[in-house]
Image (cartoon, rainbow, N blue to C red):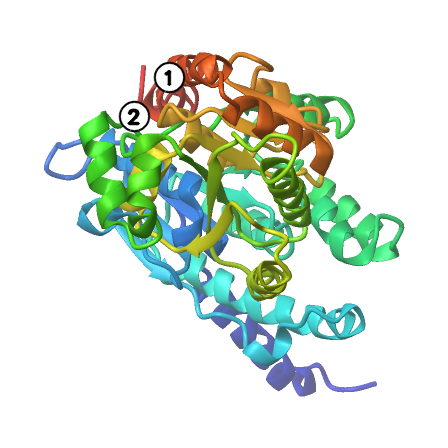
Amino acid sequence: MRDPEQWLPLLVVVFTIISIFLLSLPSTCRSDVRFKKDGNPIRTRVQILVLGDIGRSPRIQYHALSIAKHGGLVDLIGYTSSELHPRIRCESSIIVHGLAPAPDCLSTSNKWLFLLFAPLKVVSQTLSVYYALGYRTPPAKWLLVQNPPTIPTLLVAQAICFIRNTRLIIDWHNFGYSILALKLGSTHPLVRLSWLLERAFSTKATAHITVSNAMARVLQGKWGLRDLVLPLHDRPFPEFQPLDESQRIEFLGRCPETGPFMHKLSTGDMNLLVSSTSWTPDEDFSLLLEALISYSKLATSAQPRLPEILAIITGKGPQKESFLSRIRALTDAGKLKRVHLRTAWLSVEDYAKLLGSADLGVSLHTSSSGVDLPMKVVDMLGCGLPVVGWDEFEAWPELVREGINGRGFHSSDGLCTALASLFGSDKQHLRHLRQGALLDGQRRWDDEWDSVAGKLLGLCT
């Protein structure tokens, strides 16, 4: 039998390792301390995490600005590839912490390479997010996390909240497993695993915020989440306002995409159609192309009085170049007569003015889950712009009311019919939809946020 003293060096090493680990853990939030030593109240600090490009996550930026507006402090964590909202940079109560992107070699559109590289990318993201939440930012009372992506976001968030005594709020934009199904197929084992993990990692959150009532019902019913589940619908921010005729003419004249068509747009011989996209698989732009081809045939044959269309598509994303190639081929083949297609990437201010100058907005969002909603439609309605959109999913009626502020379609023929009807000689229906859009756009982000998230965070009464 060994002498107990022989175990002493090993015990010292183990004790040292454990001590170093415990001492290196992130500091915790003292929720019981409400006042500073000078007697002033401690401001509520909120960490906001999006494992994506902050500049292309308007809802997350709006959360940050609303928290700062009501006296909170915000650590905004995510990728900083795109331009941020102008007010984010000017707000001293918001500190942006950029995440280091995963190596480019781990990104692929190939289904089989994705299965190989995905675990490596998750490890890289886990380390980056853990370090940002635990060491680059002070302890916070709340951690607001955008979901999806689910992996590794929710796992790291749960660990950080446990270590730092922070309360977790999940802001549900969609379901991560449903987006993964677009890439791998709904029956793939990894999709099933993703659903199980998403459900498991969400059970310990203090509260859940959803973009639709339908999503809240799914979380409470099918997912069995009994914690606080609060719908918080997207609403337009102050930048998205209707334009008067002089403002419209001024913008159309200086915008590079509309300037060459200024005369026809101002006389009504051409209608301006706008659609915004992130160029991802849940938006099928072949529908729009097929509808415009059919419209071109109508305008050059059976209905020659139909106006020309200038269609401007804004946004960045992986499928943009493929779309541009198709446009060039169709134009060269003479299939887009009386139709002009342009793409653009605009600042927030100019994008809002483009919407305010347009005649009709188009949404091709098909919803991978059936219960998320496209924020682009919210911005359109905020500018008084009526919308036609894909309506074959459960949450759509929460945003667009048929025949009141927009119209739905579920095929390219349906979209073509809507365009021909609304742009025809009698535009009374289009004017009626615009009035409905103007009415719906009156409820703003602050009205929605203050009554839901503001109360939850204790910043609004």
Which quadrant holds residue 367? top right
Judging by the rendered image, the residue that carries numbered circle 1 is 438
Of residues 265 and 280, the one nearer the viewer is: 265
Q: What is the CA distance from the residue labelled 2 to the residue labelled 1?
A: 8 Å
Given the image, on which type of amino acid does mark 1 rest?
Leu
Q: Residue at position x 57%, y 30% from top?
A: 419
Q: Nearer the viewer, residue 45 or 96?
A: 96
Quarter of the image where the N terminus is located: bottom right
Q: Which of the pair 46/244 is nearer the observer?
A: 244
Residue ID at (38%, 20%): 441
Q: How crowded is mark 2: few (under 14 residues within 10 Å), some or many (20 or more)?
A: many
Image position of 208 with respect to 253: above or below: above
- Answer with left or right where residue 89 lies relative to residue 150: left
Q: Determine contact: label 2, label 1, CB under 8 Å.
A: yes
Viewer-proximal residue among 406 and 289: 289
Residue 453, placed above or below residue 341: above
The answer to which quarter of the image holds residue 79 is bottom left
Badge 2 marks a residue whose secondary structure is loop
Mark 1 Cα shell of 10 Å, populated few (<14), some (14-19), many (≥20): many
Q: Which amino acid does label 2 sit on?
A: Pro
How far across and how far down the image is residue 175, in percent? 67, 41
Lower position in the chain sequence, tag 2 or tag 1: 2
For the C terminus, the quadrant is top left
The residue that mark 2 highlights is 242
The label on residue 456 is none
